[in-house]
Image: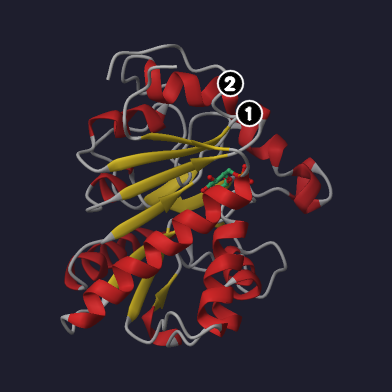
């Protein structure tokens, strides 16, 4: 099939994730060689799990160090206490941060415990910290069934920045198993905006399994459309779509 060169299709999620982890490692090493820190935008969900597993493995093999890495997570549920097992703080510790040599002061995750009035200032400060760190060198992304990136649900604008958002009913439904029932799934989240993500120097959007095939086809091949926020990324100068055979199964033949 003829597809754009920035669409990479792998036999399975493991092969894809190993390559993504190696790529992240090479960015860190390259920056390190010129004395620069690396600023990573990180994602949660099932999709990046094998990337984190491989990064931990590479760390244990002493192929990479995270001492000079600064991270910004895409989002956090609101309200959400960091010690709650479903918080994205708990997720990131469990799958990555507890197993590598990152300095906790270099880790940034939206604070799900703020009082509502304090959220706008927090969000502005989050944006400012990304800029002060030199901008995101690399953003790792999954995609929700609604086409969301981070928690930028349908109708998010390209100009959106970090803010409090309402979760789409489909997104909440997808989280039922994690929270033991719909009533326990938070209704809101604090998420980086589309623009925050778009300003990253490089983006890799990962999608695995058949259940992502419809939204991947829309996000990559249909007109840019606020109903599918991930479609904004089609215009990004340095985005790669990392797919497995199943998530790529509905892509149509396309001239590069
Ligand atoms: C959550 C996260 C997104 C993620 C999406 C997909 O909604 N906020 O960043 O991309 O889930 O989840 P999964 O990778 O489990 O399919």
How many numbered discs, if any?
A: 2
In the image, what residue occupies the spot 57% across and 50% down? 15
Q: Quadrant of the N terminus?
A: top left
The residue where tag 1 is placed is 246
Ligand 1 - quadrant of the structure image: top right
Q: Is residue 58 above or below residue 244?
A: below
**Residue 113 seen from this side:** yes
Instruction: Tell me: 46 left or right of 58.
Output: right
Q: Residues within 10 Å of mark 2 (few under 14, many from 20)?
A: some
Q: Is residue 55 above or below residue 204?
A: below
Q: Considering the numbered disc 2 on the image, is that residue within a helix, a strand or a loop?
A: loop
> Answer yes or no: do the residues labelled 1 and 2 have beta carbons within 8 Å?
yes
In the image, what residue occupies the spot 27% across and 20% down? 256
Q: Is residue 193 above or below residue 223?
A: below
In the image, what residue occupies the spot 30% across and 76% down? 29
The residue where tag 2 is placed is 249
Q: Looking at the picture, how far across and down is residue 96, in whole percent?
A: 57, 73
Q: Looking at the picture, how far across and down is residue 221, in whole percent?
A: 38, 18
Instruction: Tell me: 33 left or right of 214.
Output: left
Indicate the quadrant where residue 154 lies: top left
């Amino acid at each position: 099939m003829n597809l754009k060169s920035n669409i990479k299709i792998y036999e399975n999620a493991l092969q894809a994730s190993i390559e993504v982890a190696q790529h992240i490692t090479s960015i860190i090493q390259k920056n390190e060689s010129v004395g620069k820190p690396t600023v990573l935008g990180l994602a949660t969900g099932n999709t990046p799990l094998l990337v984190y597993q491989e990064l931990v493995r590479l760390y244990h093999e002493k192929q990479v160090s995270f001492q000079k890495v600064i991270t910004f997570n895409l989002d956090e549920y609101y309200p959400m206490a960091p010690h709650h097992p479903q918080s994205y703080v708990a997720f990131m510790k469990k799958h990555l941060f507890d197993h590598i040599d990152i300095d906790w002061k270099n880790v940034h995750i939206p604070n799900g415990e703020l009082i509502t009035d304090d959220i706008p200032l927090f969000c502005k400060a989050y944006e400012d910290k990304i800029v002060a760190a030199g901008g995101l060198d690399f953003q790792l992304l999954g995609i929700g069934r609604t086409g969301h990136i981070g928690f930028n649900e349908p109708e998010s604008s390209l100009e959106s920045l970090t803010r409090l958002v309402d979760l789409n009913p489909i997104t909440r439904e997808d989280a039922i198993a994690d929270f033991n029932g719909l009533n326990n799934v938070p209704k809101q989240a604090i998420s980086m905006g589309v623009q925050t993500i778009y300003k990253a120097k490089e983006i890799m959007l990962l999608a695995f399994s058949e259940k992502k095939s419809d939204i991947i086809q829309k996000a990559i091949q249909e007109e840019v459309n606020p109903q599918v926020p991930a479609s904004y990324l089609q215009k990004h100068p340095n985005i790669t779509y990392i797919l497995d055979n199943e998530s790529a199964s509905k892509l149509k033949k396309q001239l590069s």
